[in-house]
Image (cartoon, rainbow, N blue to C red):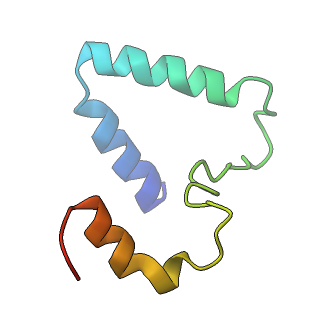
Amino acid sequence: MSAAHEELHRLVDRLSPAQARRLLRWAETELAGLPHDGPVRRRLSISGIGASGDGHLSERVEDLLAERFNRSV
């Protein structure tokens, strides 16, 4: 058994019954239709989370943060 597999077992053992039911529903939804004997392809669910269409955000990060937190730079 791999270290990741063992860690997953430890985490699942710590779940409350309600958490276990929620995790099971999520896993069944995520794994529905996937072959059980092949490799699992994972989707990167956070990809594109910061896509704003503005290519210059990194240049303005200090201004944007100051604006968000009402502080001067």
Query: Is residue 17 depicted above or below 38 in this figure?
Result: above
Image position of 13 (left or right of 54): left
Quadrant of the snapshot with the C terminus? bottom left
Image position of 70 (left or right of 9): left
Q: Residue at x 20, y 62 (%)?
A: 70
> Residue 62 appears at what percent x and percent y?
34, 80
- Number of numbered discs on residues: 0
Image position of 12 (left or right of 42): left
Query: Is residue 39 depicted above or below 9 in this figure?
Result: below
The residue nearer to you, when weighing 11 against 2, is: 11
Query: Is residue 36 depicted above or below 4 in this figure?
Result: above
On the image, which quarter does residue 3 sit in?
A: bottom left
On the image, which quarter does residue 22 sit in?
A: top left
The residue nearer to you, when weighing 8 against 71, is: 71
Q: Residue at x 48, y 20 (%)?
A: 24
Query: Is residue 28 depicted above or below 53 in this figure?
Result: above
The residue nearer to you, when weighing 48 against 22, is: 48
Q: Residue at x 56, y 53 (%)?
A: 46
Q: Residue at x 36, y 40 (%)?
A: 9
> Residue 68 appears at what percent x and percent y?
29, 60
> Residue 25 appears at what percent x and percent y?
51, 17
